[in-house]
Image (spheres, helix red, strand yellow):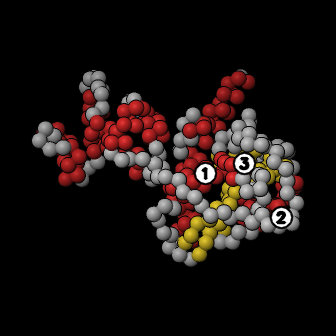
Amino acid sequence: MKYAFIDKHKSVWPVSVLCEQLEISPSGYHQHRQRRRISQGKPSGRISNDALLAHIKAIHVQFKGEYGWPRVWKELLANGVRVGKERVRQLMAQHGIKAYAKRKFKATTNSAHGLPVAPNLIQRDFSPALPNRVWTTDITYLDTGEGWLYLTVMLDLFSRQVVGWSIQPRMTQQLVVDALRMAWFRRRPETGLIVHSDRGSQYCSHLFQSTLKAYGMKSSMSRKADCWDNAPTESLWGSLKRACVYGRRFRTRAEAIEAVMNWLAFYNARRLHSTLGYVSPMQFEKNWLAEQERRSA
């Protein structure tokens, strides 16, 4: 009945106004119209700017303002909305819809120590040919009403999937060792995997280095004060901060942990990654495994 009311009065009032008064979403109304046309055997036709804008806004909200026009366009296609990328770019620009800007973060690395430093084994080659060949790792921080939280991850460069993580109120050796252990138990990589980090004392510590050796892994470290040597992990932090932190104040550590865990799950399973051809890390690896099975059949 509500949809019929909108059909009857949309020549007088904008669809967005009618939807607001009837407490339904504009995107839901336009999807209903699309389904009705298909069920009646009619061509779907060109989606209106009003309908397209409703879809764009819904995606922008769903992904917490993290997506710019390329990812919004890919998400529209994935949802069955066939539209040109230039039209999406122009419509978003006209309505001021854009991804949150990147910000600079304070450094968490303490490299003022006398511990041994590993050589840089990857030399900014961030595209290994196989999974579980190179993991990168770093530490970032989150502020809460109960004090700081420190987060570290293990990122598989092949698929950009977060394969291990740890989040704790102190930035200790155990923080990074726990993330490494999680990654090892989840992936069980072959001997020789490279773990690349900065020169922080946590990564240079005897505990972390001895754990690497016990797992048959090799340590690699960035050059001094050069964040570009670990660019994929820095990019991950930027995405996390834009999605979870900007404009938000965590009252408790538990609240922050829940937000981070939810985002990491979304990142692995859903977030479209430009370097992977706009599929998620898990989907990229799934596609790769399917291709290996096809070739070996």
Q: Is residue 80 left or right of residue 142?
A: left
What amino acid is labelled 1 in the image?
Leu
Residue at screen point 46% across, 44% down: 68
For disc 2, the neighbor class at 10 Å (few under 14, some 14 to 19, many from 20) is some
Looking at the rendered image, the quarter that the C terminus falls into is top right
Please say whether residue 107 is visible from this viewpoint: yes
Q: How many marks?
A: 3
> Does residue 111 lie above or below 29 as drawn?
below
Q: Earlier in the sequence, mark 2 or mark 1?
A: 2
Residue at screen point 48% across, 40% down: 71
Residue at screen point 49% across, 52% down: 101
Element class at badge 1: helix
Q: Residue under circle 3? A: 229
Q: Is residue 96 left or right of residue 255?
A: left
> Does residue 140 lie above or below 56 as drawn?
below
What amino acid is labelled 2 in the image?
Ser
